[in-house]
Amino acid sequence: MVESPRVDAHRRTGVVTGVRGLGGSPPYQVHWSDAERGHDTLVYPGPDAHVEHPPGGTGAADAEEADAMQTTKRWNVDVVVSEESEGDSARTWAEVGLATDDGTALRGHGMARKHPTDMDVPEIGEELAVSRALSDLSRQLRQVAAADINDYSGLPWRPT
């Protein structure tokens, strides 16, 4: 599987049909399952790629591989931006939301103001408001991690 770097594109999946490197290392011969690619290519996997082994292996080697298998989760952040203008000044608000499979739901907030003497470039207000909302979300996520570390280890951790 190769994860998409963009939210408007889907991950690519394929089947490894051959291993060309020594000792099971890349490159891999992959048959892509998506309709547009549906052909074989030689792949040197990058950091956005991972290999999933089919469940129900039959031998000890399969059990060892299952223990070393990676897992991938996708978290999506929802971003809402609104702007309010009053004369020559404007305010832009952003709210970002994160909901994970384990039930964690967080919301970050950010705001930017346009001074009456500033040029009217709405993108700048949006960028500042969203960056501040993401920073707020990041701070909250560090606090959740700190609480989880404390719960599981019994040792306090203070996010920096």
Image (cartoon, grey):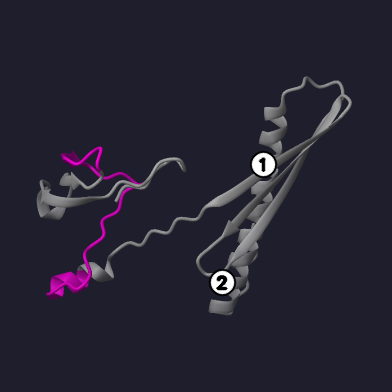
User: To which residue does mark 2 refer?
Assistant: 149
**Residue 39 at x, y percent in the picture:** 16, 40
Crowdedness near tag 2: few (<14), some (14–19) or many (≥20) residues, C-alpha within 10 Å: some
* Residue bearing mark 1: 130
| Residue at image location 72% in from the left, 32% down from the top | 125
| Residue at 86 percent of width and 28 percent of height | 89
Residue at the image position 62 percent from the left and 46 percent from the top: 79
Residue placed at 72% from the left, 23% from the top? 121
Residue 98 in the image: above or below residue 120 = below
First along the sequence among labels 2 and 1? 1
Magenta range:
35-64
The amino acid type found where label 1 is placed reads Val
Secondary element under disc 2, as helix, strand or loop, is helix
Dot label at residue 144: none
140 shown above or below 102: above
Secondary structure of residue under mark 1:
helix
Query: Picture coordinates of residue 41 (x, y %)?
Result: 17, 39
